[in-house]
Amino acid sequence: MYSDGHQGLPRGVPVQIYDSTCGSRASMSDHRLILEQLLHQLPPIVLASASPRRTDLLASAGIPHRIVVRSIDEAGLSGATAADTAMQIARAKFAACEDLTRQELVICADTVVELDGQVLGKPVDAQEAREMLRSLSGRMHAVHTAVVMGTGGARVETVATTRVWFRWLPDDWIDAWLATGKAFDKAGGYAIQEGIGLVAVERIEGDYNNVVGLSVGDVVQGLETIAAGLATASEKAS
């Protein structure tokens, strides 16, 4: 497939389309039934994130939720590794919403891009975004998404890592993407599912959705763990 000029890319650029759907209609139906049974064991879910990509992922998976956004100061939040940094920020987001966990299940996440051991956050301007994309061009980087979720005394923390290889990016591709204004709310200055991300990615190792912003599989496993913990606590209380 080739760009038609309306995707933040020059016309005629080859575009890689990732198909995130898999399995038969029957298997999808079974998945929905199992998920519905799981959700009945849990309190209402809150996604503490302003990311439209994360809410879309949860909605696509059939996980109903409401959105709550509370600002935190990320300055000074860092860990020994890039993955640790993502976890520190996710924990801070969870702490800011912990009052909600008395009656709801809160999900918080943070995504960082790592290149040569350095964290690439969200670019503050076009120049920084351009520098980030040039540094990623033709190289492999890692995307880490940390998730903290919990309700009451039950809490689960996970970190998923996906390795992403970029092909070489001409400056006109980068300029076309920056002109859309969509680079500034994304770690590393790109989104794998749109714009320059559609042509930049040569291959990945790991969960595609993790690069989008949330490993849905990890979230579901976390929900299962929390549901089991709540059931055990209820049995002990009775």
Image (cartoon, rainbow, N blue to C red):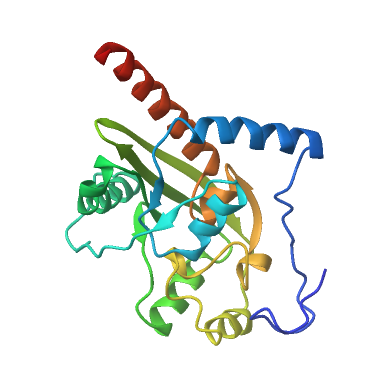
Residue at image coords 55%, 66%: 137
Front residue of this view, candidates 235 and 4: 235
Q: Quadrant of residue 235?
A: top left
Q: Is residue 197 visible?
A: yes
Q: Residue furthest bottom?
A: 179
Residue at image coords 73%, 47%: 21
Q: Where in the figure is residue 166, as x and y percent of width and height? A: 60, 60
**91 vs 75: above or below:** above
Image position of 211 (left or right of 203): left
Q: Where in the figure is residue 10, as x and y percent of width and height? A: 71, 84
Residue at image coords 80%, 40%: 25
Q: Where in the figure is residue 23, as x and y percent of width and height? A: 77, 38
Q: Where in the figure is residue 211, as x and y percent of width and height? A: 53, 53
Image position of 38 (left or right of 28): left
Front residue of this view, candidates 118 and 187: 187
**Screen quadrant of the N terminus:** bottom right
Q: Residue furthest left?
A: 76
**Screen quadrant of the C terminus:** top left
Image position of 174 (left or right of 223): right
**170 vs 90: above or below:** below
Q: Quadrant of residue 231?
A: top left
Residue at image coords 53%, 46%: 63
